[in-house]
């Protein structure tokens, strides 16, 4: 048996880091969405995502998806990268699970097409096909808006935007700090698995593999626990008194107001058409 | 178990946001009261910990791999209320920055994985390990059982949320608008894969991690 859990973990950690570097690179480009105030961009994108949930007409969904791709192009995002990033993995997985739903066994209705395989009759129904198409389009459109928001905004700024929603400080501060530790931990995982890989010369029984994984998680927790003390001292040294203080340096420009106006017109127009 | 956008209809999403709002408010109030100032970074570190647990691939028989969710482990380590905040934070970062789990489904995802999973797991662990000494094997077994049962409860809930979509949202002609499968399909599929595979991964990881941590008693 191959030790594929080691490789998969290393690949997972590396692709996570690679993706984050790509995202930061796109966020630093001088494109349309990158130039917008993160607050305005986040609010309008969240409204689009909520609206996608309410739309029942597939044509309107296609229009919104086209708008999303157009915005990606305006923001100097490589469309091939964007399509790959958005279609793999969730929409493809959704496509796979929605496939049986086009047949009459799961969605009875008006027959569109019928065929036989090994004596079994399969009927594709209009209701099944249009339901599955609507489902996939909805999933990919929402995900595209989320990914577009996250790759055109510096992650740290995106998390700071959460403050405008009056979320309790404990959540906002924890989110900002957590984001930094995720990178540290991912690096720890990558290094640990690389170290294991370099020392394991033979195939491991899965039980041994499981105990290695559990030991690593326990070890990560111990490191986290020790880190807590050091981080608290560092916070104290920087003037932490129990209440976090955050800077507010977001600024609205004419371009932001123009985008807000445009986005609201689209949202209201769609709202009245559904 | 992360529900993406588009799987649940607006009514379900709205209900779960409404249910989670008071839970989040209560969690932040309880944690603020009970957590000492010097433990504040622990919440963030715990959140990052629950974020990366899913990145640990665990080998399973047959040559393939799975991953644990870690919700019960985080609850045993931090307590259920702090775990609720830590997992919520991890889920929000996953949804907002990495598109893993939907934004509109954050309420439902948090209900399943940041509320039901840690609370069910924590109290099952407490009930089984009641009065057991810190280094006892009963605690290891309790953690494993708690991981298995709580994950399956959460998976069952997710299946239920998927399964009620065709009942709630359908056009007059019978076309599904969101998740196309009813309870008769969604519930057995979600429960089946967790009862047979992922529940065991969760049980083994939770139990073994508790076992390793027992050797270093100060850490939990």
Image (cartoon, rainbow, N blue to C red):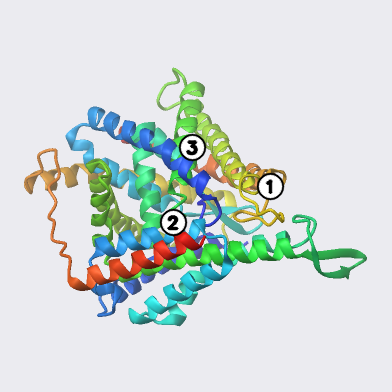
Q: Quadrant of residue A122?
A: bottom right
Label 1 resides on the chain identified as B
Residue at image coords 56%, 67%: A137
Mark 1 crowdedness (10 Å alpha carbons): few <14, some 14-19, many ≥20: some
Residue A232: x and y in percent read 16, 43
Tag 2, which secondary structure?
A: helix
Q: Which mark is residue B135?
A: none
Looking at the image, the residue that sits furthest to the front is A272
Mark 1 / mark 3, whichever is N-terminal: 3
Q: Mark 2 highlights which residue?
A: A50
Pointers 2 and 3 in contact (CB under 8 A)? no
* Closer mark to the observer between disc 1 and disc 2: 2
Depth-wise, is mark 1 or mark 3 nearer the camera? 1
Separation of residues labelled 1 and 2 (CA atoms): 23 Å
**Discs 2 and 3 lie in a common subunit:** no
Foreground disc of the pair 2, 3: 2
Residue furthest to the right in view is A119
Which chain's residue wears label 3? B
Residue B117, label in figure: 3
Q: Mark 2 and mark 3: span between their CA atoms?
A: 26 Å
Q: Position of residue A70 (x, y in %)?
A: 41, 79
Q: Residue furthest top?
A: B131
Disc 1: which residue: B182
Relative to the observer, which residue lies in front, A114 or A57?
A57
Chain letter for mark 2? A
User: In percent of the image, x 19 and y 72: which residue is there?
Assistant: A254
Tell me: residue A269, above or below residue B105: below
In the figure, is residue B212 to the left or right of A140?
left
In the depicted view, which residue is nearer to us: A160 or A137? A137
């Amino acid at each position: 048996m191959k030790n594929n859990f080691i490789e998969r973990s290393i690949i997972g950690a590396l692709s996570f880091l690679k993706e984050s570097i790509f995202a930061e690179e796109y966020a630093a480009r001088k494109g349309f969405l990158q130039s917008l105030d993160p607050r305005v961009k986040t609010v309008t994108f969240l409204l689009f995502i909520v609206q996608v949930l309410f739309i029942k007409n597939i044509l309107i969904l296609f229009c919104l998806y086209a708008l999303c791709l157009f915005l990606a192009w305006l923001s100097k995002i490589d469309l091939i990268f964007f399509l790959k990033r958005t279609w793999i993995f969730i929409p493809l997985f959704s496509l796979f699970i929605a496939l049986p739903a086009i047949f009459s066994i799961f969605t009875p209705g008006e027959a569109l097409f019928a065929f036989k395989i090994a004596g079994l009759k399969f009927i594709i129904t209009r209701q099944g096909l249009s339901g599955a198409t609507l489902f996939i389009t909805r999933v990919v459109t929402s995900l595209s808006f989320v990914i577009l928001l996250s790759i055109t905004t510096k992650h740290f700024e995106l998390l700071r935007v959460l403050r405008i929603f009056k979320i309790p400080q404990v959540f906002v501060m924890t989110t900002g700090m957590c984001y930094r530790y995720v990178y540290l931990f991912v690096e720890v995982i990558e290094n640990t698995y690389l170290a294991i890989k370099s020392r394991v010369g033979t195939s491991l029984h899965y039980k041994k593999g499981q105990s290695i994984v559990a030991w690593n998680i326990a070890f990560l927790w111990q490191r986290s626990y020790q880190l807590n003390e050091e981080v608290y001292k560092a916070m104290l040294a920087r003037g932490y008194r129990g209440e976090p203080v955050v800077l507010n340096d977001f600024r609205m420009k004419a371009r932001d107001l123009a985008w807000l106006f445009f986005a609201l017109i689209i949202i209201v127009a769609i709202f009245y058409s559904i | 178990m992360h529900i993406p956008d588009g799987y649940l209809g607006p009514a379900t999403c709205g209900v779960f946001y409404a249910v989670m709002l008071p839970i989040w408010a209560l969690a932040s109030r309880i944690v603020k009261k009970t957590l000492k100032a010097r433990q504040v970074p622990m919440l963030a570190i715990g959140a990052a910990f629950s974020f990366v647990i899913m990145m640990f691939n665990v080998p399973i028989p047959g040559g393939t791999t799975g991953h644990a969710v870690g919700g019960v482990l985080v609850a045993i380590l931090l307590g259920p209320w702090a775990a609720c905040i830590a997992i919520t934070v991890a889920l929000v970062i996953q949804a907002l920055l990495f598109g893993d789990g939907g934004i509109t489904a954050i309420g439902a995802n948090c209900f399943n994985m940041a509320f039901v999973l840690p609370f069910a797991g924590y109290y099952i662990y407490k009930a089984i390990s009641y009065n057991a000494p810190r280094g006892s094997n009963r605690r290891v077994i309790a953690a494993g059982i708690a991981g298995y049962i709580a994950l399956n409860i959460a998976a069952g809930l997710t299946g239920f949320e998927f399964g009620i979509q065709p009942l709630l949202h359908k056009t007059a002609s019978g076309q599904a608008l969101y998740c196309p499968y009813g309870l008769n399909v969604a519930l057995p599929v979600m429960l089946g894969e967790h009862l047979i595979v992922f529940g065991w991964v969760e049980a083994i990881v939770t139990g073994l991690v508790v076992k390793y941590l027992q050797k270093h008693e100060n850490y939990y």
